[in-house]
Image: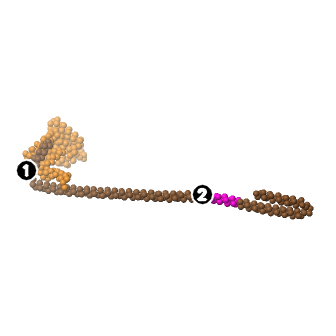
Chain colours: A brown, B orange
Amino acid sequence: MKYILTITSLLLSFSICMAAEEAGAKEAAFTDFLYRLLNFSVMIAILYVVAKKMAITDFFSIKREEIKKRFEELQTQKFEFEKKANELESKLKEMEEKKKEIIEQFRLEGLREKEKIIAEAKERAAQIMAQADMAIQQEVEAAKERLKAEIVDLAAERAKDIINRSIREKDQDKLVEEFIEKVERVH
Amino acid sequence: MRVSKIAKRYAKALLDVGKEDGNYERYGSELKEFAKICSDNPEFFNILSSPVFSLEERMKILDDVLAKAGFSEVINNFLRILMERKRINRVLEIAEYYSFLLDEFLGIARAKIITAKPIKKKTMEKLIAALEKFTSKKVEAETEIDESIIGGVVVKIGNLILDGSIVAQLEGLKESLKRSGWG
C-alpha cells in the first residue's frame, strides 16, 4: 500500500512537469524552472514524509510485533508459572495430607505401643505377685519342715535319754532275740 | 582298704601254692603276722620299702627278721621275692586280700558283733547260728561293746551291715516322722 502511494505521487509529479512543458516553451522557461523546482521540492517533501512515515510505521510495527511476541511469551511464561504454582500447591496439599497421615499413623502406633507396654507391665506384675506368693508359700513350708525336724530331733533325743536310763538286761536280751528272729526270717 | 591288682595277683599266687601243699592256713597266719610286724613297726617297714638303702642291705634286715620269726620257707621266699621285685610295700594289701581269699576258700564269714552291753553266751551262739544260716558260711565272730547304740545289736559282715540297735530304730522313726505328713 505504501509502495503504491509512493509510485502514484511520483507519476503525478511527472505529468505536471510534462504539462508545463507543453504550455509555453520559451517564455515560461523561468516559470518552468520554478515549477520544476517546486515539483522537485514537493517530491522531496513527499518522499521525505513518506520515507519518514514508512520508517516510523515500520519501527512501531516491529516494536508492536516484538511487544506482542514478548507479551505472548510472557503470557506463556505466566501460564507456565501458574501451572507450576498450581502443581506445587497441589503437591504441598498432598504433602500436608501425607504429613497428617504419618502423624496419625504414629499416633496410632504410639497408642498401640502404650497399650502393649501397659499389658506387658500388668502381666509382669501378675507374674511377680505369683512368684512372691509361691516364694512365701515355699518359705512357710520350709519353716514348717524345719520346725517339724527340730521337734522330731528333740523328741528323738528325749526318747534316747529315757530309753538309755530305763533299758534293762531283759530288754537287751529281747532286742537281740528280735534281731535274731529278723535275721532268720530274711533267710 | 582298696586292694591293687598287683596285690591281688601275689595273694592269689600264694594261695595257689598253699592249696597245692595244703598249708594255706599257715601261710595266711604267717603273712598276717608279718603284716602286723610291719604295721606295728613303721620304721622297719619304711626301711624295707625305701630305695635309699641298697637291696642287699634291706634283704639282710629282712632275713634277720625272718630268721627270728621262724616262718615257713614258702613265706620267707615269698617275702624275698616281694623285696626283689620292689613290691614289699604292698605286703599289707597282699595279707588282707589273702585273708579274704582264704575265707572265701574255707567258706568263712567274718562278723563283727557290736552290742551296748555284753550278751549271754547262749544268745551269742544263737545269733552266730542265725548269721551262719543267713550267710550260708561258717561265721567267725568278733565282739565289740559300744554304749552309744543304747541297746540291740549291730552286725558287720564285710560290706554288709545289719543294724538292730535302738539308735538305728530311733533314727528310722525320726526319718519316718519327718517324711510323713505329721505336723
Q: Earlier in the sequence, mark 2 or mark 1?
A: 2
Q: Which residue is mark 1?
A: A170
Mark 2 nearby-residue class (10 Å; few <14, some 14–19, many ≥20) = few
Q: Amino acid at mark 2?
A: Glu
Question: Who's the residue at 88% across and 61% down the image?
Answer: A20
Question: Who's the residue at 22% across and 40% down the image?
Answer: B9
Q: x, y (%) of residue A138?
A: 25, 56
Q: What's the mark number on residue A51?
A: none
- How many numbered callouts? 2
Using the rendered view, name the quadrant where residue A24 is placed.
Answer: bottom right
Q: x, y (%) of residue A62?
A: 70, 59
Residue B56 visible, this orientation: no
Q: Which residue is mark 2?
A: A80
Q: Nearer the viewer, residue B132 or A29?
A: A29
Image mark 1: chain: A
* Magenta segment includes A65: yes
The segment highlighted magenta reads A62-78
* Magenta segment includes A1: no
Using the rendered view, name the quadrant where residue A56 is placed.
Answer: bottom right
Mark 1 nearby-residue class (10 Å; few <14, some 14–19, many ≥20) = few
Outermost residue, right side: A26
Q: Quadrant of the C terminus of chain B?
A: bottom left
Q: Is residue A112 left or right of residue B164?
A: right
Question: Who's the residue at 89% across and 61% down the image?
Answer: A23
Question: Looking at the image, is B38 positioned above or below residue A3?
Answer: above
Q: Amino acid at mark 1?
A: Lys
Question: Looking at the image, is A83 positioned above or below residue B48?
Answer: below
Question: Who's the residue at 42% across and 57% down the image?
Answer: A109
